[in-house]
Amino acid sequence: MNDHAPNSWEARAEEYSLYGFTDLPSVRDRGTVVVTHGEGPYIVDTNGTRYLDSNSGLWNMVAGFDHTGLIEAAKAQYDRFPGYHAFFGRMSDQTVALSERLIEVSPFARGKVFYTNSGSEANDTMVKMLWFLNRATGRPQARKILTRKNAYHGVTAISASMTGKPYNEVFGLPLDGFIHLTCPHYWREGRDGESEAQFTARMAAELDEVIAREGADTIAGFFAEPVMGAGGVIPPSGGYFQAIQPILKKHGIPLISDEVICGFGRTGEVWGCETYGFMPDAIISSKALTAGYFPMGAVILGPDLTDRLQEAIDTIEEFPHGFTASGHPVGCAVALKAIDVVLEEGLLDMVRAGAPRMQAGLAEIARHPNIGELRGIGYMWALEAVKDRDGKVPFDGSLSVSERIANTCTDHGLICRPLGQSVVLCPPFTLTDAQMDEMIAKLDASLKQVFAEVA
Ligand code: PMP
């Protein structure tokens, strides 16, 4: 049991703060890490302890925790104009500039952008746009949303309904009309004797069947992360997007790429859809959009949805949706800088250069017989722990193996994240070779320690 002094930061945190996505018995046992500041990829707590945060906060702090250029961009904009909205025909100059820049760096020849404060709200906004444009153009029944099991799209009522995780049952979610297809994870979902190509064909056939069963004219859109992130870093099976996109096209169902994690370099290209060679109808962005230095999300519409939404808006004469801080000028100024930092100042190149080193280091660790699968791309990887590798048998859930690994890593000064029976690493793009070696060495030591305890 932790024994914090009554007035310590840890005790005050537990007394007054509610914790999201936190295993409370573990916090009661181990205490809260109260963070005061960061140094490069490290965070520092109130006791002065430094941790290498291999998760970039929550995938978002891609430039580390003390990037001068980003901090200066925010300060300069606070000096110029510290806040405004984007309602009633007004918006800040920074908002105008960012939308132009986002379309320039998007895969779309032309398009339009709508801002939110988070990735969840961006997904909700996209769904409401689809509902709105379908109703306005005589297709009010086209409301169903297709996603996949294990997908993570957020926590608001719509985006949680899109999320394919059973924990949302505690809220009585999903809402009606949200349909979750099989997760395209060949290692876990492939059947005995089924090749990867056959598995992908089965995923495509399932999509076809679901569309036939539900009726294509009742479906508003299909949302997919290029690589599932919070589902446990699951890249699609080979050829997955090439197999499903023609089916969606045939039925006129928009494909929305949720790039909240993948966008701006995490997969080694600007967009995950580039890495996997498909062209979505819209992109959902957040996290690295501001390098985590301001809360912001964006819906980036490609040409077809831009035209269809515009037609609907012209009919209704208004799109009745928006957040007080949509297109916040400080957020937009920070995003403009973050895009430059990632694309022009070398961060994307650092991911491209560092990814083989990270993969090789993790592949060495994955030789351990209790690692069932190493999966990922670019700077997003997961190692899945198994009791028996050949049978892909997971450890007994009561052993909380991935939580133990993450806690042991924390004891060694490394933050990593347990997800199911996997541990996830998605470091800042600024990581030096020495910091990457430190990350790999600490993970290796922690895994060996835990496997020796539980095996
Ligand atoms: N989509 C994806 C793919 C995500 O990973 C996340 C957050 N991890 C979200 C949406 C939701 O974003 P937010 O937490 O900013 O609401």
Image: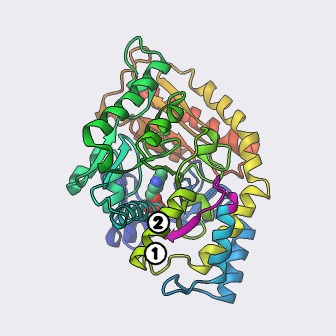
Circle 1 Cα neighbour tier, 10 Å, few/some/many (<14 / 14–19 / ≥20): few
Q: Residue furthest top?
A: 193
Q: Quadrant of residue 287?
A: bottom right
| Secondary structure type for disc 1 | helix
Which residues make up the magenta segment?
104-118
Residue in view at x 58 percent, y 45 percent: 279
- The residue under label 2 is 309
Residue 213 percent across, percent down from the top left: 25, 37
- Which corner quadrant of the image does residue 83 belong to? bottom right
- Inspect the image, locate mark 1, and give the three-letter code of the amino acid beneath it: Asp
Q: Is residue 294 left or right of residue 246?
A: right
Query: Are circles 2 and 1 on residues that touch, CB within 8 Å?
Result: no
| Mark 2 / mark 1, whichever is N-terminal | 2
Near-viewer residue (403 or 8) = 403
Amino acid type, residue under disc 2 in the picture: Leu
Is the CB atom of the residue marked by disc 2 within 8 angstroms of ligand 1's nearest atom?
no
Q: Residue furthest left?
A: 172
96 relative position to 254: left or right: right
Task: Judge: label 1 CB < 8 Å from ligand 1.
Answer: no
**Residue closest to the eye, 240 or 450:** 240
Is residue 47 inside the magenta stretch? Answer: no
Q: Which of 120 and 387 is in front in this view?
A: 120
Q: Mark 1 points at which residue?
A: 314
Give the Cα distance between marks 2 and 1: 8 Å
Q: Which of marks 2 and 1 is in front?
A: 1
Q: Position of residue 375 (x, y in %)?
A: 54, 31
**Helix, strand or loop at disc 2?**
helix
Would residue 23 be visible to someone looking at this image?
no
Q: In this view, does 264 lie above or below 329?
A: above
Dot 2 crowding, Cα within 10 Å, few <14, some 14–19, many 20+? many
